[in-house]
């Protein structure tokens, strides 16, 4: 009868604890450069899920031909984009061959290499439910869970630990680039290394705090960084590119993972410059971006600017005499000019603007949000906040007739009702079709472009006038 040994290791259901008798290390080939040897690190993030990583390291190189391991790179590196050059002796250093080694040490990768081999495993003692025994076993499979052969029996179940005699070859603690190089220069050189990597993204988010008079506001912009690259960027110079950069490949889909939300960094406006046909934003200080972290960085602060609130009812339906009375919503817009004279004047990256306003009791309430596209300086910004509650528009087509070959004449009757206590300034914008002209109108209008007209209406409260009536007739030739 075999002697039993009792182990006080904790029991982990469906889990494997690996203990390795040899010191855990990878087999080093030639010279190794570690991330801690960086002299500088710059990460430039694009808003399509990609980043350009550039770093400079002091690296010990072999004399003549030899292997160099460059450890501490992003797991999502796009290997064909890798560029390496020596800043110390550019004419004396060349990379002949490069490999990206990303088979990393994990419970699964270790056990996968022991399939069919003998190892030691801590199993429940069949004679004592509170004890465990250390047994030799052959690992038969390692798919959903390890399957062991112990003597002439197959064991599938919970176990406490697995002991491996040695570290399998080829596994690495972190992603590593392995280069075959030829060096005819000094043994220690400064190398400049850059590559594109996926799994990194950024977006702009804006907070608009609107005064109660709806005429002034403060705008703050924040950059939200999302790092799912498998690499932490410590003390990195951060640059962001805003614009539609063409990429000849499918846009990467970032997997949702558990993320850490870093606290927003102290407000410090990013520096902006034009770059190619895009805009480049640079943070004036280094930043730490952990792997699987979402971080916010201040983009801009505009403490005071002017804006306007507009009520706009837009209609673009094709004239149909049988549709009866149409009830229109009246949209509420906040508009401002992105100009230096208005406290702004910086290109605004695309993003979401969320607006807030204080109520009478002093509490701040959310009043709406809208998405803006990349907005150049001196452009107008229009934000749709929602629909007005107390202003309603109804329209009815009161006439529709054919008055000539391909010529139709129709008349709109539009009723606007204001249930507020004060007059409301409303813009009524209609889209017309074909070659059109307005023959009669009860109110003045302006032509916005080839297809749109606008009526500017001052609508009194319903306590003074039940509703405002607008009529106009259009002739259109198709």
Image: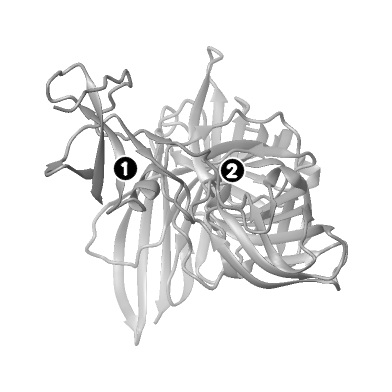
**Sequence-wise first label, 1 or 2:** 1
In this rendered view, identify the residue nearer to me: 2 or 55: 2
Image quadrant occupied by the N terminus: top left
In the picture as drawn, the residue positioned furthest to the front comes out as 1
In this rendered view, identify the residue nearer to me: 42 or 138: 138
| 54 w.r.t. 307: above or below | below
What label does residue 119 carry, if any? Answer: 1
| 440 w.r.t. 144: above or below | below
Q: Quadrant of residue 132?
A: top left
What label does residue 377 carry, if any? Answer: none
State the count of labels: 2
Counting from the top left corner in percent of width and height, residue 298 is at 68, 36
Disc 1 element: strand
In the image, which is nearer the foreground, mark 1 or mark 2? Answer: 1
Disc 1 versus disc 2: distance between alpha carbons? Answer: 45 Å
In this rendered view, identify the residue nearer to me: 142 or 377: 142
Counting from the top left corner in percent of width and height, residue 94 is at 76, 72
Horizontal arrangement in the rendering, residue 404 relative to residue 345 (left or right): left
Q: Quadrant of residue 60?
A: bottom right
What label does residue 225 carry, if any? Answer: 2
Counting from the top left corner in percent of width and height, residue 368 is at 48, 36
Q: Residue at x 22, y 23 (%)?
A: 4
Horizontal arrangement in the rendering, residue 236 relative to residue 49 (left or right): right
Image quadrant occupied by the C terminus: bottom left
Q: Contact (CB < 8 A) between labels 1 and 2?
A: no
Disc 2 element: strand
| 360 w.r.t. 273: above or below | above
In this rendered view, identify the residue nearer to me: 159 or 266: 159
Q: Residue at x 30, y 51 (%)?
A: 117
Q: Residue at x 61, y 66 (%)?
A: 245
């Amino acid at each position: 009868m075999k002697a039993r040994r009792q182990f006080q290791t904790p029991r982990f259901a469906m889990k494997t604890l690996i203990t390795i008798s040899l010191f855990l290390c990878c087999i080093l080939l030639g010279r190794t450069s570690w991330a801690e040897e960086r002299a500088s690190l710059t990460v430039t993030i694009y808003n399509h899920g990609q980043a350009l990583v550039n770093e400079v390291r002091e690296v010990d190189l072999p004399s003549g031909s030899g292997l160099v391991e460059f450890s501490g790179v992003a797991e999502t590196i796009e290997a064909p984009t890798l560029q390496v050059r020596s800043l110390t002796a550019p004419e004396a250093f060349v990379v002949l061959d490069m490999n990206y080694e990303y088979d990393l040490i994990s419970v699964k990768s270790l056990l996968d290499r022991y399939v069919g081999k003998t190892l030691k495993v801590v199993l429940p003692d069949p004679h004592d439910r509170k004890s465990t025994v250390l047994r030799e076993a052959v690992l038969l499979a390692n798919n959903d869970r390890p399957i062991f052969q112990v003597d002439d029996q197959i064991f599938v179940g919970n176990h406490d630990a697995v002991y491996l005699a040695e570290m399998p070859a080829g596994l690495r603690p972190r992603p590593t680039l392995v280069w075959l190089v030829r060096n005819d220069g000094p043994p220690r050189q400064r190398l400049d290394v850059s590559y594109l990597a996926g799994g990194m993204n950024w977006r702009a988010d804006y907070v608009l705090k609107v005064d109660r008079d709806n005429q002034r506001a403060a705008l703050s912009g924040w950059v939200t960084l999302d790092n799912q690259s498998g690499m932490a960027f410590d003390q990195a110079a951060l640059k962001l590119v805003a614009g539609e950069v063409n990429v000849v490949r499918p846009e990467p889909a970032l997997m949702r993972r558990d993320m850490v939300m870093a606290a927003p960094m102290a407000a410090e406006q990013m520096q902006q410059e034009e770059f190619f046909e895009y805009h480049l934003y640079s943070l004036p200080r280094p930043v730490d971006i952990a792997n699987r972290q979402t971080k916010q960085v201040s983009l801009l602060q505009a403490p005071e600017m002017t804006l306007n609130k507009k009520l706009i009812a837009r209609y673009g339906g094709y004239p149909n005499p049988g549709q009866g009375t149409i009830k229109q919503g009246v949209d509420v817009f906040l508009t401002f000019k992105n100009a230096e004279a208005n406290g702004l004047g910086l290109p605004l990256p695309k993003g979401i603007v969320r607006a807030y306003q204080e109520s009478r009791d002093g509490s701040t309430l959310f009043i709406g949000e809208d998405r803006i596209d990349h907005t150049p300086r001196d452009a107008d910004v229009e934000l749709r906040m929602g629909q007005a509650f107390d202003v309603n528009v109804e329209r009815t087509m009161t006439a529709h007739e054919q008055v000539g070959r391909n010529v139709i004449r129709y008349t709109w009757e539009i009723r606007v009702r204001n249930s507020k206590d004060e007059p409301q300034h409303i813009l009524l914008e209609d889209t017309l079709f074909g070659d059109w002209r307005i023959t009669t109108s009860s109110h003045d209008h302006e032509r916005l472009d080839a297809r749109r007209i606008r009526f500017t209406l001052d609508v009194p409260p319903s306590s003074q006038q039940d509703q405002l009536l607008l009529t106009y007739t259009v002739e259109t030739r198709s």
